Amino acid sequence: MTSFKRLLVLLVCLYCIGLYGQSPSITVSDIDVSGSSQLEVPIKVSRFNQIVGLQFTLSWDADLIQFTSVDSFGVDLNENVNFGIEQVESGFLVFSWYDATLSGVSLPDSAVLFNIHFEVNNNYTGEIELTFGDEPAPREIVDTSYKAIPGDFIDGSVEIMMVSSYDLVEASSVIQELKIYPNPIYEKSILSFYSATDLNYLIKIIDQMGRVVYQQHNRFSAGYQQIEVGRQWFPSSGLFRMVIEGKDFLITKNLLVR
């Protein structure tokens, strides 16, 4: 291949990459929820320039969460017109919108198109995926050329952590002011608390299958304590339960590991 042809191929590749980076994107925001049965999931847009029409299907596991409503509209929307809710009990929501003026609508990057609300079923804890699809309504974006254009539809997830009855309260007169920060855990977190007496206790990390994946025994004198919770305590990312067990107390904390 001649140098000219190589240069031509390179320019074409760069041009295609540039076009891809300019495509509109529709994103389900990843969120973490703790201690609540109510979910609010933002659907956001970027590179949303001179858009005349948008359509997609959003799906989820209807055994885990139940659709309740939509709100916080970023464009001129009507809940009864632009949202097909006939199949929400099966985990499908259809969205279909067009600009009545046909002049095109632009929104800033990361603008909220709408929020979707769910109720968590049966105190579920764990990860729930929300995904874009083409059934019953296919994904489509139309701009002022009045033709369908490429776009990025980016799935998201919700991580639900339910607060146990021991969380954020004094377990007994022995352990007080117990905190773990930050939570979610990325590299490490700090477990801190006040011990009213000298203390022997066991820390266990338990996965969602009920398996003990890490444990350690500790002894401290009375006073304020800090323990580094390392990422190496956990075999993978996900939801885990920390159990702190002593002679006169039992404390559990839910931890999300990234």
Image (cartoon, grey):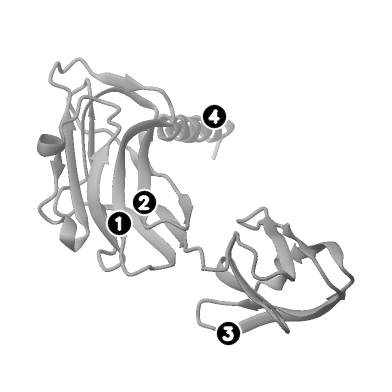
Q: Which of marks 2 and 4 is nearer the N terminus?
A: 4
Mark 3 or mark 4, whichever is nearer to me: 3
Give 224 or 94, whichever is nearer the viewer.
224
Q: Image check: 132 left or right of 87?
A: right
Residue 39 shows which numbered tag?
2
Q: How far apart are marks 2 and 4 (CA)?
A: 56 Å
Q: Where is residue 140 in the image (x, y as percent from the top left)?
A: 22, 39
Task: Evaluate if marks 1 and 2 touch, with contact meaning CB atoms under 8 Å apart.
Answer: yes
Amino acid type at circle 4 is: Phe
Q: Which of marks 3 and 1 is nearer the N terminus?
A: 1
Residue 34 shows which numbered tag?
none
Q: Which of marks 1 and 4 is nearer the N terminus?
A: 4
Residue 119 shows which numbered tag?
1
Task: Evaluate if marks 3 and 1 touch, with contact meaning CB atoms under 8 Å apart.
Answer: no
Residue 211 shows which numbered tag?
3
Q: Does 82 appear above or below 171?
A: above
Task: Evaluate if marks 3 and 4 touch, with contact meaning CB atoms under 8 Å apart.
Answer: no
